Amino acid sequence: MDKGFIFVLIAIGAIWFFALRDDAGSASSFSGVSELVHIEPDNFQSEVLDSPVPVVANFTAKWCGPCKRIAPTVEYVAVELKDRAKVAKIDIDKNEALAAKYGIRGIPAFIVFKNGEPVGSINRGSVGSMVAEVESYLD
């Protein structure tokens, strides 16, 4: 291949990657999804434990490669579940105590909370499989 052609491909890839990044640093085809709730130590109680709807807590970190790869899927899940459940993004670097409290040893990790209690975890996968797993916890 011509070196110029390879350079152009790399440049296009870099532009695409950085143009689609959201404020949290994850690549997304639609950034700024309002259905995602970003958890800080001071809003965990109100957004997760006191939530009137079930919450999928996504434990993640900005430096985590697998977390970045699954971020668009998590955003789609948030859109699919917006009327029935909430998806909360929890940065383990900002919320170390929460990660320790819920036994998070690897990320990304997903815990489903219902009525303020953890009721299960879900596996990462396709949007459809993640939505189906969350729906199994809904009334």
Image: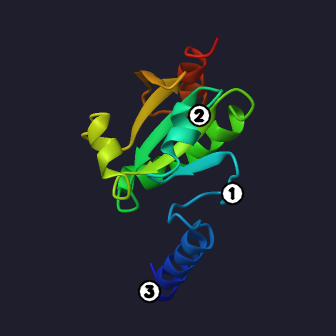
Q: Nearer the viewer, residue 6 or 94?
A: 94
Residue count near mark 2 (Cα–Cα under 10 Å), binned few <14, some 14–19, many ≥20: some
Give the residue number, with chain letter if any, for mark 1: 30
**Residue 3, labelled with which disc?**
3
Q: Is residue 10 above or below residue 136?
A: below
The picture places residue 45, in percent across and down from the top left corner, at 50, 39
Residue placed under numbered mark 2 in the picture: 127
Task: For the C terminus, give its image quadrant.
Answer: top right
Circle 2 or circle 3, nearest the eye: 2
- The residue positioned 59% from the left and 34% from the top of the image is 127
The image position of residue 126, as x and y in percent, is 54, 33
In this orientation, does residue 14 appear? Answer: yes
**Relative side of 63 to 88, left or right:** left
- Res 104 seen here: no
Where residue 20 sits in the image (x, y, percent)? Answer: 62, 67
Q: Residue at x 27, y 34 (%)?
A: 103
Q: Amino acid at mark 3?
A: Lys
Say what secondary structure mark 3 lies in. Answer: helix
Whole-number angstrom distance, CA of label 2 to CA of label 1 = 15 Å
- Residue 94 lies, with reference to residue 101, above or below; the image says below
Q: What residue lies at 50% left-to-right and 88% top-to-bottom?
A: 4
Residue 110 image point, x, y percent:
43, 34
